[in-house]
Amino acid sequence: MENCEVPIEILVRVLGGLQQIIYLLATVAEKGTVKQRFKVPLEMQQRYALRASIPQPGSYTLPIVLNSGFNSHLGNYTEIMEKLEDFFSSLIHSNFKQTQDIFPDSKLRNRALLESKRILPKAGENWSLGFSLPDRPELNLTNGSTAYINGWLNQESSEDTVMTVTGELIRIDFDKRTIVLKYPPTHQEIECFYLEELEDSMIENRRQLIQVTGQFTLDAEGHPTKLTDVTRIEPVELSPIILREISWLERKLICKNPLRLIPKMDEDTSQLFVVEEPNIGLHVFAYTRDDLIYEINEQIVMMWDEYAKASVEDLASDAQHLRKQLLNQIEEV
């Protein structure tokens, strides 16, 4: 972050998600359960409201405390903040057993995992989230935990029956817990059965392209006709991908000038994210934005090894041009 500044959208996203996780931890501490859609009682909102202090110099350091008007009477304060620290640690170290211990109720746990995805950097965002209690080491959360969270949310589904489809959200039935998605390749409506904790994200993204992940039923031509046990509902994110560095295994490539890539949906099916950058011969596609960025990194590293590190005499003229373009824009450290 430059000049101790942070985009408002990111700040709102992180603090809003953090508050929701505190409410979930407070529900566990007070032995609460979730039988219907999770709704925070007004009294709990007052008791466990986070308050932000004046930012401190640094990356963007923001002191936060639980509602100071209640702290002197709040016996769960220390326990909840330590549980928050433990929860973040479980995400960093992919320790699902620890996550289960913190959130024994599966509905609360799934909601906490979804809120965690909300506060983590999205694929391609070049920032991380640090969290520390007084006199304790800082925990550093990155978008590397997102893949583990997705795996945990999908853990009860067999791997060969899970897919992601993209379409327009056109109807929601809260009583039946179903949504109806218009699927572009067939122009058919697909009924999807969702988890209660996904309702907020559906309301936020109504009437636009969204991606739904869950177990599916296929027709004779291989198109999905029904989705059950939906675990993820996310908007289609087509904002620019800004690449400053590519980390691959134990290697790192640095872009001399940030590489700005504009994703789009493929014209035929609207199911694939596509990125093209002719200057360096990049053409990548994937079903999700996260997978797209993974493929971009992999292809750039592959091209670097195949062309930039090759001897000029061993390359044809067009490959020599590509080699020059790569060397002009990228260096390995």
Image (spheres, rainbow, N blue to C red):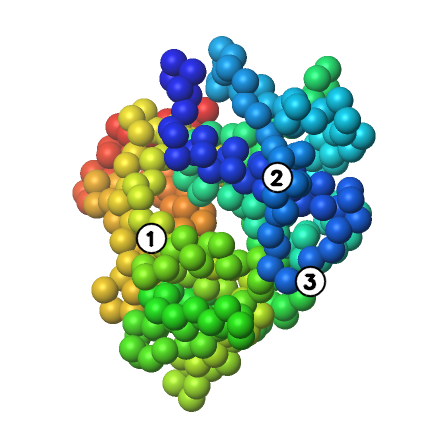
Image coords of residue 129 (percent x, y): 54, 30
The image's mark for residue 284 is 1
Q: Nearer the viewer, residue 22 or 48?
A: 48
The residue under label 2 is 45
Real-space Cα distance between discs 3 and 2? 19 Å
Q: Earlier in the sequence, mark 3 or mark 2?
A: 3
Of circles 1 and 2, the one toward us is 2
Q: Nearer the viewer, residue 20 or 326?
A: 20
Residue type pointed to by label 2: Gln
The quadrant in which the N terminus is found is: top left
The residue under label 3 is 35
Image coords of residue 76 (percent x, y): 78, 33
Real-space Cα distance between discs 1 and 2? 45 Å
Instruction: Provide the secondary structure element on which disc 1 rests.
Output: strand
Other-residue count near label 1 (Cα within 10 Å), few / some / many at <14 / 14–19 / ≥20: many
The answer to whether one can see residue 250 in this image is no
To which quarter of the image does residue 219 belong?
bottom left
- Residue visible at 45% across and 77% down? 191
